[in-house]
């Protein structure tokens, strides 16, 4: 028998097809339903991009109004979710808080039965996706406020998604430059084809499990530092370096110690992450607004030193980390922000998986002991 060809990490293995997103190798652009993500970030609201990813087309005014009208009643932090969060230990990981909250929401949704014949329709799961999309900001905002001993801030129906998220986190109306940068970040993080967490969601959905179970699994995958968390590590790196003048010596030591420098490189992008220029421009606007040229000096110094030494360019996490810091988010909140954005991509893939489902069940090459038998006594 010929030994199977093993593709470690499923690298370059095509496990299915999707119409949701891809990277165009000719332009190096990430495309959402065919649209370059940088164009969407420059022109669209996060709500409009959510509908694009779910439905395949940019929304009409009526469709956008549907999202706003149907979603806003689900913005407040529900009592059962708050009780579950408050029951967790102080200092619980924010991703554990978020995973727990989504489980509570799923139980409330009454998805106890799997998607057997006659289970939820696409329209029903789209409505569930919208409710989850609307509920996550209050959970994440309360997570940060809870860590500071603060009560939740009720949502406002007159605010956009981005405005309301920032309002519930900080309790003040955000400046337009902050809203714009946050909106752009959400769009840029919303989707990225068969990444680890999205593939996890599709595997769970392929078993005919429910939508919330698939999202909980995706959150678990994103919690791992090799997938999510890089934007957090960028800020920890900046805190460790301190000033731009220290970037070169710090990097020399880190490379000599074979440390992994998060925020650089990407399995998909070989010539630089196409999302970076848009987020870098947003970071520049925030630096000017908050008068923090020191942060940008450090950003540029570390990037320059790393590219010169390794020839590897930043990914989206590199500018988004300091941008979220300037927006007033705690560093440990950064990965939950990733969830708030990527839940759109996850649910779009869950819907797509269920439309033409095949159970995802790969084979494994065996490298253990040969067949043997229990010795007689």
Image: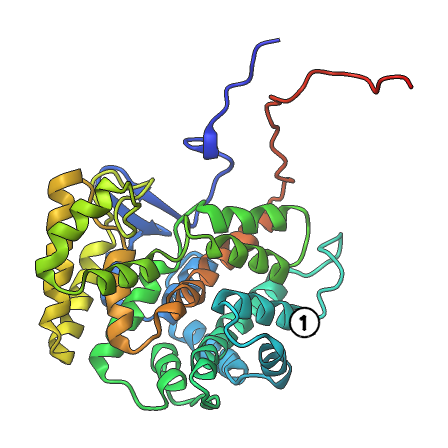
Q: Residue at x 58, y 75 (%)?
A: 89
Instruction: Report whether 8 appears left or right of 351.
Output: left
**The C terminus sits in image quarter:** top right
Check disc 1 and report the residue beneath it: 109
User: Residue 123, position in %: x, y?
Assistant: 60, 64
- Quick check: 201 above or below 212? above
Name which residue lies at 33% across and 63% down: 187
Q: Residue 238: where, in percent of width, then height?
A: 22, 62
List the single residue furthest toward the front.
Answer: 377
Query: Horizontal placement of 189 versus 113: left or right?
Result: left
Label 1 Cα neighbours within 10 Å, binned few <14 / some 14-19 / many ≥20: few
Residue closer to the observer: 82 or 64:
82
Q: Nearer the viewer, residue 181 or 267?
A: 267
**Residue at x 58%, y 60% (from the top left corner):** 216
Residue at the far top in the pictured view: 1
Residue 37 visible within the image: yes
Q: Is residue 345 left or right of residue 373?
A: left
Q: Is residue 225 above or below residue 331?
A: above
Residue 41 appears in the picture as rendered = no
Q: Residue 13: x, y in percent?
A: 46, 31
Q: Secondary structure at mark 1?
A: loop
In percent of width and height, residue 67 lies at 47, 75
| Horizontal relation, residue 365 to residue 310: left or right | right
Task: Please state which of residues 252 and 36 is positioned toward the viewer in this rendering.
Answer: 252
254 vs 75: above or below: above
Q: Residue at x 62, y 8 (%)?
A: 1
């Amino acid at each position: 028998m010929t030994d199977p060809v093993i593709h470690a990490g499923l690298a370059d293995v095509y496990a299915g097809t999707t119409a949701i997103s891809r990277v165009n190798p000719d332009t190096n652009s990430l495309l959402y339903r065919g649209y370059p993500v940088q164009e969407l970030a420059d022109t669209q609201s996060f709500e409009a991009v959510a509908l694009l990813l779910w439905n395949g087309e940019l929304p009409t005014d009526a469709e956008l109004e549907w999202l706003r009208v149907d979603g806003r009643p689900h913005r407040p932090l529900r009592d059962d979710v708050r009780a579950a969060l408050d029951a967790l230990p102080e200092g619980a990981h924010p991703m554990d808080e978020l995973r727990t909250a989504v489980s509570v929401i799923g139980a409330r949704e009454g998805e106890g039965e799997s998607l057997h014949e006659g289970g939820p329709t696409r329209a029903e799961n789209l409505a569930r996706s919208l409710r989850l999309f609307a509920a996550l900001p209050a959970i994440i905002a309360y997570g940060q406020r809870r860590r500071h001993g603060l009560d939740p801030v009720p949502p406002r129906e007159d605010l956009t998604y981005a405005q309301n998220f920032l309002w519930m986190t900080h309790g003040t109306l955000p400046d337009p430059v902050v809203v714009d940068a946050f909106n752009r970040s959400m769009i840029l993080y919303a989707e990225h084809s068969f990444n680890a967490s999205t593939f996890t969601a599709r595997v769970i959905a392929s078993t005919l499990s429910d939508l919330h179970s698939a999202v909980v699994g995706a959150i678990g995958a994103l919690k791992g530092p090799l997938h999510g968390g890089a934007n957090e590590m960028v800020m920890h790196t900046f805190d460790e370096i301190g000033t731009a003048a220290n970037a070169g010596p710090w990097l020399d030591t880190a490379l000599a110690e074979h440390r992994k420098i998060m925020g650089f490189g990407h399995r998909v992008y070989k010539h630089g992450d196409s999302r970076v220029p848009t987020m870098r421009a947003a970071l520049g606007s925030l630096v000017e607004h908050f008068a923090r040229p020191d942060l940008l000096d450090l950003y540029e110094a570390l990037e320059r030193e790393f590219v010169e030494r390794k020839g590897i360019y930043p990914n989206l996490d590199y500018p988004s980390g300091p941008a979220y810091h300037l927006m007033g988010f705690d560093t440990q909140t950064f990965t939950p922000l990733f969830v708030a954005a990527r839940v759109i991509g996850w649910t779009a893939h869950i819907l797509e998986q269920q439309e033409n489902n095949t159970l995802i069940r790969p084979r494994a090459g065996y490298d253990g002991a040969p067949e043997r038998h229990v010795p007689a006594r």
